[in-house]
Image (tube, helix red, strand yellow):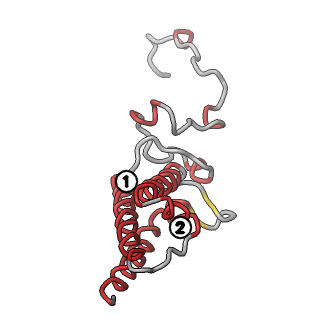
C-alpha cells in the first residue's frame, strides 16, 4: 500500500507531544501584529477562551466609531457644564474639576482602554458565561448614540 519508494523510517516525528492549545498565545506579542489567526480552527476550541491575531474590520470600525462618539460626548459635556449642567459620573466629574484638557484625555484614555480590552477579550464569556464580550463591544456605540443625542437635545432645548 502507498508508495513503495517511500519508507516509513524516512519521516521523523517532529511534534513534541505537548498540546500548544493548553496555554494561549498572549495578545501582546509581535505575533499578534503579524499573525494569521482570525477565528478558532478546531470545533472543541469554540468552547474555550481563545485569542485571535487579526481583528475583523467591523470590530475595529466599532471601536473607532465608539471613540469618536466618546470624544463628541466629552466636548458636548464641556459645553453643557458651561451652561451650569452638572456631570453625573463622579470619576469624570473629578477630571472635569482638573480642567478641560485632563477631562478630555481621561475620557479618551479610559474609553480606549476599556474598548481595547473588550476587543482583545472579545471571545470570552462574561457575567457568568451569559454573554460574550464582543456583544458588549457592539452595544456600547448605541449607548453612546443615545447619550450624545440626549446631550444635543439638552443643548437645543437651552
Residue mark closest to the camera, 1 vs 2 = 2
- Disc sitting over residue 158 in the figure: none
> Farthest residue toward the right?
128
Tag 2 or tag 1, which sits nearer the N-term?
1
55 or 152, nearer to the observer:
152
Circle 2 packing at 10 Å, graded few (<14), some (14-19), many (20+), is some
- From what the image shows, is residue 106 above or below residue 87? above
Locate the C terminus by quadrant.
bottom left
Q: Residue at x 60, y 38 (%)?
A: 24
> Farthest residue toward the bottom?
157
- From what the image shows, is residue 59 above or below residue 26? below
110 or 17, nearer to the observer:
110
18 or 127, nearer to the observer:
127
**Secondary structure type for disc 2:** helix
The image shows residue 30 at horizontal and vertical percentages of 45, 30
The image shows residue 23 at horizontal and vertical percentages of 64, 36
Q: Quadrant of residue 154?
A: bottom left
Q: Residue at x 50, y 65 (%)?
A: 135
Q: Quadrant of residue 37?
A: top left
Circle 1 packing at 10 Å, graded few (<14), some (14-19), many (20+), is some
Q: Residue at x 48, y 64 (%)?
A: 96
**Secondary structure type for disc 1:** helix
Q: Is residue 58 left or right of residue 1?
A: left
Between the C-alphas of marks 1 and 2, the distance is 29 Å
Q: Residue at x 40, y 56 (%)?
A: 101
The image shows residue 131 at horizontal and vertical percentages of 59, 66
103 or 4, nearer to the observer:
103
Q: Which residue is mark 2?
A: 93
Q: Which residue is mark 1?
A: 60
Q: Is residue 127 left or right of residue 117?
A: right
Amino acid at each position: 500500500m502507498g508508495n513503495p519508494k517511500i519508507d516509513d523510517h524516512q519521516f521523523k516525528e517532529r511534534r513534541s507531544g505537548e498540546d500548544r492549545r493548553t496555554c494561549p498565545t498572549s495578545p501582546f506579542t509581535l505575533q499578534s501584529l503579524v499573525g494569521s489567526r482570525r477565528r478558532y480552527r478546531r470545533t472543541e476550541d469554540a468552547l474555550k477562551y481563545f485569542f485571535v491575531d487579526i481583528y475583523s474590520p467591523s470590530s475595529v470600525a466599532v471601536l473607532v466609531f465608539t471613540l469618536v462618539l466618546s470624544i463628541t460626548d466629552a466636548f458636548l459635556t464641556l459645553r453643557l457644564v458651561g451652561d451650569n449642567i452638572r456631570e453625573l459620573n463622579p470619576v469624570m466629574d473629578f477630571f472635569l474639576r482638573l480642567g478641560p484638557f485632563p477631562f478630555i484625555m481621561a475620557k479618551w484614555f479610559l474609553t480606549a482602554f476599556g474598548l481595547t480590552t473588550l476587543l482583545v477579550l472579545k471571545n470570552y464569556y462574561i457575567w457568568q458565561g451569559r454573554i460574550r464580550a464582543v456583544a458588549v463591544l457592539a452595544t456600547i456605540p448605541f449607548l453612546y448614540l443615545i447619550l450624545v443625542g440626549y446631550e444635543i437635545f439638552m443643548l437645543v432645548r437651552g
